[in-house]
Amino acid sequence: MKNGKKMTVILGILILFSGLGAQQLIDGIAAIVGNDVVLMSDVGMLVEQYAFQNRIDLTKNPALYKKLQKEFLKRLIDQKILLIQADQDTIKADPEQVDRSLKQQIDYLIRQAGSQEELEKYYGAPLYKIKSDLRKEIENQMRISMLREKRFSDVTVSRQEVERFYETYKDSLPVKKPSVDISHILMQVTPSEESIRQGYEKALKIKKMLEEGADFAELARKYSEDPGSATNGGDLGFVSRGTFVKEFEEVAFGLKKGEISDIVQTQFGFHIIQMLDRQGERIHVRHILIRVQPTKEDEQRVINKLKDIRRKILDGDSTFEQMALRYSDDPNVKKDKGHLGTFEEGTFQIKEFENVIKNLKEGEISEPFRTEFGYHIVRLNKRETGRKLDLKRDWEQIEQWALQRKRQEEFEKWLAKLRKEIPIIIKMKI
């Protein structure tokens, strides 16, 4: 379980969320939870997401459709209950963590759909609207996780409880499949200083044209590299705080009506922003985006650096862990020094890892290889054959399962108590 968490951090994948495409549905109140409501569109969207992910045609299975409606309505009610409790405990998510998770998940969704245009077509909404809805859901999930951690992190298991758990469930515990223990160094391909300079100079020329009286919308249609807004003259519509990345938002919300910003740099490139209107804490803006993309030379530079790092480790000039701490772009590197943990063979969600690792011997380090996250070198620390689990060799894993089960049982008891304390009115007929 611990190692699964690490891979989850690398993947950053979460695609089940509500709110998107709600405008396509006839809305209504499915349930009232305290002073909040669960909309029928929320339930419908989760059902739609489930069917899409599992390639199910629910029009041919009305019984499953009703079952999923009940299940997702229950989940959304429980989510509302937990968010009410999170409000009472004044639990807030870190905006920077939300932004990082949002970027990872949007990138994944675009890859899954095939393009940004296809994603927008599927949800019937522009990218900024998809981001806005998904950001809220990510924030909610983070707050609920923090709430659970706060309430149940002090729950522990004794040795007797672990032994009792093992005796009770040993026949149903999974067989330990062949596995590998691995470490990696990740380097992301970023634009060179020259690429950044060229992008800035292009934005600077556009800014000069605006200062000389050129029409913003015309320049956006001609030069903006944001496919979601360029054809609309860069128009992003009315949005609330939390919709854009921090650097963009800080400037956008500081503009006066009609004012054009200086050049703003974000992770997406260089922006020029114009304030069109403001309604309280909602703003109507448009922008011109000049993307800064890595070149083939930038990519080769990363490959060469990883080859040099690999050579220095093999020559004994430095350890793998030292090099990971110095060069790896994995956000967890300060904690794990590049150690990803143990994974069962055949279960890698990043197939490039599996293809590389199957040809390595213990202690060997791979040549650089590419994944969607950048370039890696990976070291095979240990390879184990399949076997049954036992307390002596697998104590930590069994202890973790026993602890998770106990915490889940305590959580469910607590949630059942909250259900009785918070008024719930179900209006949706299923």
Image (spheres, grey):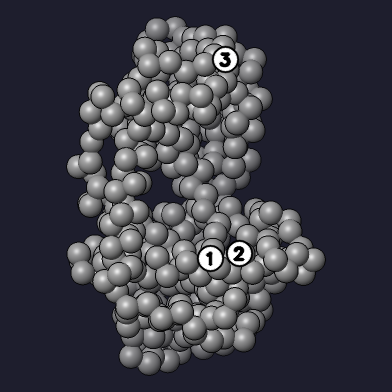
Q: Earlier in the sequence, mark 3 or mark 1?
A: 1
Tag 3 secondary structure: loop
The answer to whether residue 43 shows anywhere in this view is yes
Disc 3 and disc 1 in contact, CB within 8 angstroms: no
Give residue 68's mark. 2
Within-10-Å neighbours for mark 3: few <14, some 14–19, many 20+: few
Depth check, front residue: 148 or 113: 148
Report whether 278 appears left or right of 92: right
Q: State which quadrant residue 239 falls in.
A: bottom left
Residue that numbered label 3 is attached to: 386
| Residue toward you, 356 or 189 | 356
Write down the residue under mark 1.
Answer: 72
Residue 424 % position (x, y): 37, 77
Regarding residue 364, the answer to whether it shows in the image is no
How far apart are the alpha carbons under marks 1 and 2? 6 Å
Q: Is residue 396 above or below residue 295?
A: above
User: Which residue type carries mark 1?
Assistant: Phe
Q: Quadrant of residue 406?
A: top left
**Spatial distance from mark 3 to mark 1, Cα to Cα?**
37 Å
- Asked if residue 419 is positioned above or below residue 258 in the image, the reply reads above
Q: Residue at x 36, y 12 (%)?
A: 392
Residue at image position (57%, 15%) is: 386
